[in-house]
Amino acid sequence: MQTRTLGTTGPAVSALGLGAMGMSGAYGEADRAESIATVHAALETGVTLIDTGDFYAMGHNELLIAESLRGRDRDGYQLSVKFGMMRGPGPEFGGMDGRPEAVKNFLAYSLTRLGTDHIDIYRPARLDPAIPIEETVGAIKEMIDAGYVRHLGLSEVDAATIRRAHAVHPVADLQIEYSLISRAVEADILPTLRELGIGLTAYGVLSRGLISGHWSVGHTAGPGDSRGFSPRFSSGNVEHNLALVEALRQVADAKGCTVAQLAIAWVAAQGDDIVPLVGARTRERLAEALPAMDLILTADDLADIEKAVPPGAARGDRYPSAFMSGLGAGN
Ligand SMILES: NC(=O)c1ccc[n+]([C@@H]2O[C@H](COP(=O)([O-])OP(=O)(O)OC[C@H]3O[C@@H](n4cnc5c(N)ncnc54)[C@H](OP(=O)(O)O)[C@@H]3O)[C@@H](O)[C@H]2O)c1
């Protein structure tokens, strides 16, 4: 596994990261033993960057990660943790809490659940519109100075917010959705990151499985699977979007790889400052994803891919309407 450095001040991490959200129910029921085996398989193949969030099933995901990593050398992996998204006892989300005192409170709980004395990259999951970003990241800077956090990260914020946060403390990376069908970051956000020397960790590179080549029109999201609320998976849009995947499949077939590998490799090819996260929750899916990092895409390949899936070709927003206003970039 190659490594990539997150921005000019961030850590060197595996060129592919593992996102653990799906291991705690975001895509319906997940198999705990298989999730843990997937984390182990990732570490054994050199994946060192593991992404989680304290609100992924209310701490469940952090506890699962802690169990998976028990007994391992703490310097052998990097934990990226998102915080601040408020939950309720049911499936509801209650907005963001980015108050400085809340930052420290969330961090204390995460450190305990993860069973570690520090988090490698700590980031607010979204901007709290009621709190200036300077205050939220100022609290993280304090936690960096105190040794509890190594690096500041951001998630789904716009270019102006990135600049304001970076003026308080150097930002290692922005985590944001970036895929063949979600390219809004290319307009302002990616140039801003490059100007400031900030890395990008890309999530949703398979658009939650939609462009993985494994989703089909008849496939419906099961209970608790957030894809059941996603406009891109909804009837009327999914047929259009899967036609794009079929066009991509032709390019993948010609290249001798799978659709998922092509989609991951495309994101990785957009720059050495970009680290794709994949949301594999089984060893089988992970084993498919890993070879993507060895796939070399030529200029002709990139042109064929963009011809199959031109920018803006997908139908439907990338989040349900209630969540769209909290995003740093559009579709
Ligand atoms: N900052 C943010 O706002 C934010 C938002 C969302 C996610 N994230 C982070 O980013 C990570 C990845 O995001 P994501 O879950 O949306 O990722 P994704 O990689 O786009 O989608 C993951 C889903 O794709 C399907 N899939 C099919 N083939 C696959 C393959 N070869 N490898 C991996 N997955 C395959 C899997 O579904 P099946 O298992 O059902 O086949 C899997 O659950 C999350 O785990 C989380 O840590 C961050």
Image: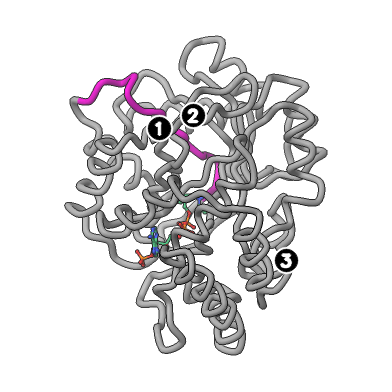
Q: Which residues are magenta?
A: 72-86
- Residue shown at 22% from the left, 59% from the top: 31
Residue 171 in the image, given as x and y percentages of width and height: 66, 26
Q: Are marks 1 and 3 in contact (CB under 8 Å)?
A: no
Where does label 1 land, which residue? 110
Q: Which mark is residue 311?
A: 3
Residue 77 magenta: yes
Q: Which circle, 1 or 3, is nearer the viewer?
A: 3
Q: Which circle, 1 or 2, is nearer the viewer?
A: 1
Classify mark 3 as within 8 Å of ligand 1 or not, answering yes or no: no
> Mark 1 vs mark 3: which is more N-terminal?
1
> Mark 1 vs mark 2: which is more N-terminal?
2
Q: Nearer the viewer, residue 84 or 169?
A: 169
Q: CA distance from mark 2 to mark 3?
A: 41 Å
Q: Is residue 173 left or right of residue 47?
A: right
Where does label 2 land, which residue? 105
Q: Is residue 61 left or right of residue 229?
A: left
User: Which secondary structure lies at badge 3?
Assistant: loop
